[in-house]
Amino acid sequence: MAETVYKLAACILHYGSPELTERIFLQLRDEPDVFVLDNAAPEPFPGAWVRLPDNLYWAGALEWAAAHFDAQGYTHLWFLNNDAYFLSRSPIIKITLQRLARMEKMLGRVGIYTPAVSASPYHPQMVQNRAVQCRQTAVVDGIAPLLNLQCLREIGGVDASDNPWGYGVDLWLSVRAGRAGWLNLVDNQVVVRHNYHSTAARIHGFMERAALAEVAFLKARLGRDYKNKIQELQAECRDINNL
């Protein structure tokens, strides 16, 4: 069987502190196809690949980046929050693609791959378990999703026109991927630390507006009992070893 060939774009979304963006950029800059997308940040990132004319927020920037890199022939997009930081050894992208290829060979096509996190106040299914190689989940946190762009096309794109802020879009994206037969996998061998709301909490009124939009967004897609539904989805996990 021919070896799977991936063409991955690693896109760091810049908004907020340039120092945070630089920290993760420096971890990856020696690897191919690493881009900083400046989301019209009040503090521009020096040397950004593209500076957008307007703030598209997380979901809009993801949609923009996915369309761009898909048109350029990339197979995958690693969409990275600038307030995440890898705790794994380098070369991070090379190792990640090797692991992804092995996962797909053993388990099937992966729609969304994501590193585990060192800690999370929201998503227990994302927290690293050193005893398990990876975990199949029904929903993933959008800190650092590595998206198969064919999967994104098949499920109809990001689907966030009614939620520009983006909260909850990551959950719905992974639910749709799973329903379409793609795997969502959390890799316990590649790990990030995330500073939750490091930028959002500093923008007056953002958290409140984003939370209201998230409630309406998730109710429209998962029903009025969406909170319990999300908890059920978070519990839908399968630990996997022997990769």
Image: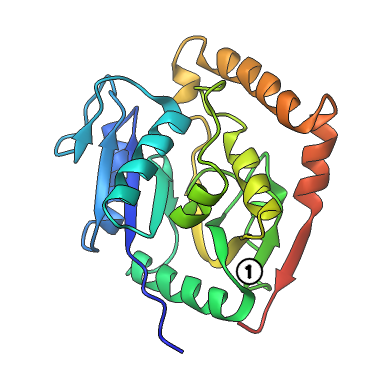
The picture quadrant where one finds residue 83 is top left
Say which of 160 and 242 sits in front. Answer: 160
Q: Secondary structure at mark 1?
A: strand
Identified at 64% across, 40% down, the residue is: 171
In the displayed structure image, the side of residue 212 where residue 68 appears, left or right: left
Estimate the x, y position of residue 180 in percent, counting from the top left: 66, 54
Vertical arrangement, residue 58 with respect to residue 129, above or below: above
Say which of 240 and 154 sits in front. Answer: 154
Identified at 52% across, 24% down, the residue is: 161
Vertical arrangement, residue 62 with respect to residue 238, above or below: above
The picture quadrant where one finds residue 93 is bottom left
Q: How many badges with numbers are in the image?
A: 1
Residue tagged by mark 1? 134
User: Residue 148: in sight, yes or no?
Assistant: no
The picture quadrant where one finds residue 224 is top right
Estimate the x, y position of residue 205 in percent, counting from the top left: 52, 10
Estimate the x, y position of residue 217 in percent, counting from the top left: 66, 24
Q: Amino acid at mark 1?
A: Cys
Residue count near mark 1 (Cα–Cα under 10 Å), binned few <14, some 14–19, many ≥20: many
Estimate the x, y position of residue 201 in percent, counting from the top left: 50, 21
